[in-house]
């Protein structure tokens, strides 16, 4: 059966009733789930990876990473720490990991009797690890495990009931993919398939801000804009709740302070730690409140247009916020205050607009791309990207209902 949201234009104050939650009012009822995870953040934490993985009961693990990460000192240290636990390696992860790679890696994992998966790298490494965990537990193919959205308001989640082996993460970016129960994989036709299972969230997350200094600041900056977007969208999501709101506001505060500091001094370990902490909070936000049209567009800019997820997030965020302003001004005003904007004497809409301008200022301070035309995207792909976006589940959770592809084309053109 599809999940259907309430009728009419959402104000951001109600959740889809068929999800089992009544309309949300301040101080009202809500349903919050916190994935069980142990999180370690300290300099040198990556060197304890083997001991921590063994403590989970894992004896044969597959390490998942991309080619660049495979050649990094961080990977070398993590792999060395695993020692004899690491019996298999999947080092062919690329951005927007594919269903084909996940299927091939899962076959190797099954053959090697893997009982844990260690993802070292960014969001694509975590998504690949989650996909492998799905196929080791559920009947395939992987495509059959994806959720489905029928615009404008029918969401068909796919239940993935079987137990999953532990996923362990050593993140190298601020995407927070390792925190969430969700993931995305690109299929053979270039579409982004989305999955959700609370058992996929990492059991152990090792954050090493000292080792993270090796990661180029440009990669960290664009992925941090992705994390910031998690917090911003979580504030006005149709599934927001008081706990996710508190996490989102604190994540925004940390990003607003730590991201410019990290860019100003890429070797500042404390600033790196602040960004990694903010990113973790952002993953906790969307683990419950989900993301909206911003991430829906970014999924498709990546899968169809080839943009990195961080770059797509960096460019699209202020445009998506402006798109939702008519129904989410109060939430965006709260974002502005969390970013340090002086909103005294401003009306709600003025404060919201000041918040969007503060996001543009954060883009400039972070040195991230701000226009699609500068990111190497083929403009002729915009209609196809808009069509793909119209089928993305992010539209289901967005506070402003999107009823036509034309509205998404207009959003993309503004970002161009």
Image (cartoon, rainbow, N blue to C red):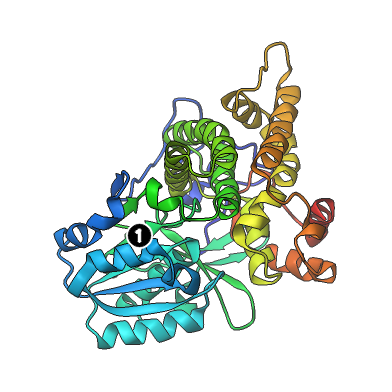
**Residue 286, percent from left and from top:** 48, 48
Q: Taking the image as drawn, is residue 391 in sight?
A: no
- Tag count in the figure? 1
Q: Which residue corresponds to mark 1?
A: 169
Residue 9 sits above or below residue 52 on the image: above
Q: Is residue 289 left or right of residue 6?
A: left
Asked whether residue 98 appears in the rendered view, the answer is: yes
For numbered disc 1, what is the local secondary structure?
A: strand
Location of residue 172 (image quadrant): bottom left
Question: Which residue occupies the foreground of this view, 416 or 194?
Answer: 416
The local crowd at label 1, few if under 14, some if 14 to 19, many if 20 or more residues have their Cα within 10 Å, is many
> Closer to the camera, 384 or 48?
48
Q: Position of residue 157 (x, y in %)?
A: 48, 64
Q: Residue at x 71, y 46 (%)?
A: 320
- Position of residue 100 measured from the top left corner of the image (x, y, whole percent): 50, 84
Seen at 73% across and 16% down, the residue is 346
Say which of 92 and 209 sits in front. Answer: 209
Q: Where is residue 209? Give x, y as percent.
A: 40, 46
Q: Is the C terminus in the top left, top right, bottom left or bottom right quadrant?
A: bottom right
Residue at image coords 20%, 57%: 52
Left or right, 214 with reference to 386:
left
Please state if 174 lies on the left or on the right of 51 as rendered: right
184, above or below 113, in the image: above
Residue 165 lies left or right of residue 208; in this view the side is: left
Camera-side residue of 20 and 262: 262
């Amino acid at each position: 059966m599809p999940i259907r949201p309430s009728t009419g234009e959402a104000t951001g104050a109600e959740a889809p009733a068929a999800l089992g939650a009544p309309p949300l009012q301040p101080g009202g009822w809500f349903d919050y789930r916190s994935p069980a995870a142990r999180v370690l953040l300290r300099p040198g934490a990556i060197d304890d990876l083997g001991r921590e993985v063994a403590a989970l009961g894992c004896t044969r693990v597959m390490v998942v990473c991309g080619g660049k990460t495979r050649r990094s000192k961080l990977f070398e240290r993590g792999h060395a720490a695993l020692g004899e636990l690491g019996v298999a390696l999947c080092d062919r992860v690329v951005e927007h990991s594919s269903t084909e790679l996940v299927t091939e890696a899962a076959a190797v994992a099954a053959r090697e009797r893997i009982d844990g998966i260690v993802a070292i790298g960014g969001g694509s490494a975590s998504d690949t690890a989650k996909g492998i965990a799905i196929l080791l537990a559920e009947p395939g193919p992987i495509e059959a495990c994806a959720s489905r959205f029928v615009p404008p308001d029918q969401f068909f989640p796919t239940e993935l009931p079987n137990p999953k082996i532990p996923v362990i993460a050593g993140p190298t970016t601020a995407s927070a993919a390792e925190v969430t129960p969700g993931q995305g994989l690109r299929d053979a036709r270039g579409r982004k398939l989305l999955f959700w299972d609370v058992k996929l969230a990492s059991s152990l997350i090792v954050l090493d801000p000292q080792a993270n200094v090796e990661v180029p600041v440009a990669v960290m900056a664009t992925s941090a804009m992705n994390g910031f977007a998690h917090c911003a969208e979580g504030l006005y999501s149709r599934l927001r709740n008081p706990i996710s709101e508190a996490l989102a506001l604190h994540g925004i505060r940390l990003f607003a302070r730590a991201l410019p500091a990290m860019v100003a001094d890429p070797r500042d370990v404390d600033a790196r730690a602040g960004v990694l902490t903010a990113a973790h909070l952002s993953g906790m936000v969307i683990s419950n409140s989900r993301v909206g049209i911003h991430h829906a567009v970014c999924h498709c800019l990546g899968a169809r247009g080839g943009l990195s997820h961080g770059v797509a997030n960096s460019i699209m965020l202020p445009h998506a916020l402006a798109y939702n302003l008519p129904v989410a001004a109060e939430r965006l005003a709260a974002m502005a205050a969390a970013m340090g904007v002086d909103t005294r004497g401003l009306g709600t809409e003025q404060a919201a607009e000041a918040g969007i301008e503060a996001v543009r200022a954060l883009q400039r301070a972070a040195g991230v791309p701000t226009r699609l035309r500068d990111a190497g995207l083929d403009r002729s792909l915009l209609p196809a990207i808009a069509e793909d976006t119209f089928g993305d589940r992010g539209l289901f959770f967005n506070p402003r209902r999107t009823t036509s592809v034309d509205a998404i084309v207009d959003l993309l053109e503004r970002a161009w």
